[in-house]
Image: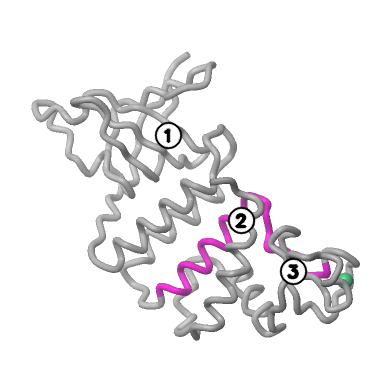
């Protein structure tokens, strides 16, 4: 099979043997790829390390195999290094590891997730509110993967009223009449449900309008999202 040209962001990178690296790539249209770049760490080859650094956006050719295993990734070239430092680097690495954990290695149309990640990388240097980025990215990735959060109705009875409980196992809101039927549900102020809905509606590149998220609100929003992860995404 001829190689496929892919655009991808490097979620994870591990040195392999003397000169190679193993990478997890989130591609724009071919899903998540576990691949090997052979010989890139040989100094005579003059391949800049940014081309295989975690967080870099690259273009490369991938020889997709018919059997499971590492794909061969060749001719990588750098499109955007997303080369951050300090707090921004910490946040970027956290997001990359989160996505690496959430997204299975498989071929699928990953455009939605790729765009979220790529827009996030572009935004990070300009945004002071790191909490907002963390909430919006986690919400959008989980939703793209089909896990929720589903916030429009009670996931047990379908009612649209009194939605002030949340169940990560069910993936969204539960009303105050039904919560006892789902032991995993916990109380969540309806205002906080509204904020979560807001993050669902707003595109990543407009998240700068959120100037501040109070501690309690942030904890509640992340609790909802983390509970979804707990029940639906294995370690
Ligand atoms: Zn209900």
Q: What stretch is highlighted in magenta?
A: 130-154
N-term mark: 2 or 3 = 3
Look at mark 2 in the image and give the residue it sits on. 230
N-term mark: 2 or 1 = 1
Task: Please give the label number shown on residue 6.
Answer: 1
Dot 2: within a 10 Å radius of its alpha carbon, few (fewer than 14), some, or many (20 or more) residues? Answer: few
Query: What is the spatial separation of the Cα atoms under label 3 and label 1, in whole angstroms?
Result: 42 Å
Q: Residue furthest left?
A: 44
Q: Is residue 34 left or right of residue 55?
A: right
Query: What is the spatial separation of the Cα atoms under label 2 and label 1, in whole angstroms?
Result: 32 Å
For the rendered model, the colour scheme is one colour
Mark 3 vs 1: CB contact within 8 A = no
Q: Where is residue 126 in the image (x, y as percent from the top left)?
A: 33, 72
Query: What is the spatial separation of the Cα atoms under label 2 and label 3, in whole angstroms?
Result: 13 Å
Considering only vertical position in the picture, is 227 above or below 50?
below
Task: Please give the label number shown on residue 185.
Answer: 3
The residue under the point 66% across, 54% down is 231
Q: Main secondary structure of the magenta part?
A: helix
The residue under the point 49% across, 83% down is 215
């Amino acid at each position: 099979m001829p190689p496929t040209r892919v655009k991808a962001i490097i979620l994870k990178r591990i040195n392999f043997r003397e000169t190679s690296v193993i990478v997890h790539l989130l591609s724009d249209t071919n899903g998540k790829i576990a691949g090997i770049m052979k010989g890139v760490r040989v100094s005579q080859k003059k391949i800049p390390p940014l081309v295989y650094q975690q967080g870099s956006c690259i273009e490369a050719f991938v020889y997709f195999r018919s059997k499971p295993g590492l794909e061969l990734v060749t001719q990588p070239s750098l499109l955007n290094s997303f080369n951050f430092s300090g707090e921004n680097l910490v946040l970027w690495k956290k997001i990359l590891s989160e996505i690496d954990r959430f997204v299975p290695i498989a071929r699928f149309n990953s455009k939605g997730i790729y765009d979220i990640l790529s827009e996030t990388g572009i935004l990070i240097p300009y945004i002071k509110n790191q909490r907002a980025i963390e909430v919006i990215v986690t919400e959008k990735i989980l939703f793209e993967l089909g896990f929720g959060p589903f916030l429009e109705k009670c996931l047990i009875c379908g009612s649209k009223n009194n939605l002030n409980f949340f169940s990560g196992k069910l993936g969204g809101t539960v009303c105050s009449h039904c919560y006892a039927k789902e032991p995993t549900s916990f109380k969540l102020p309806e205002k906080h449900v509204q904020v979560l809905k807001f993050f669902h509606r707003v595109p990543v590149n407009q998240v700068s309008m959120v100037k501040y998220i109070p501690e309690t609100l942030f904890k509640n929003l992340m609790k909802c999202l983390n509970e979804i992860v707990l029940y639906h995404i294995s370690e």
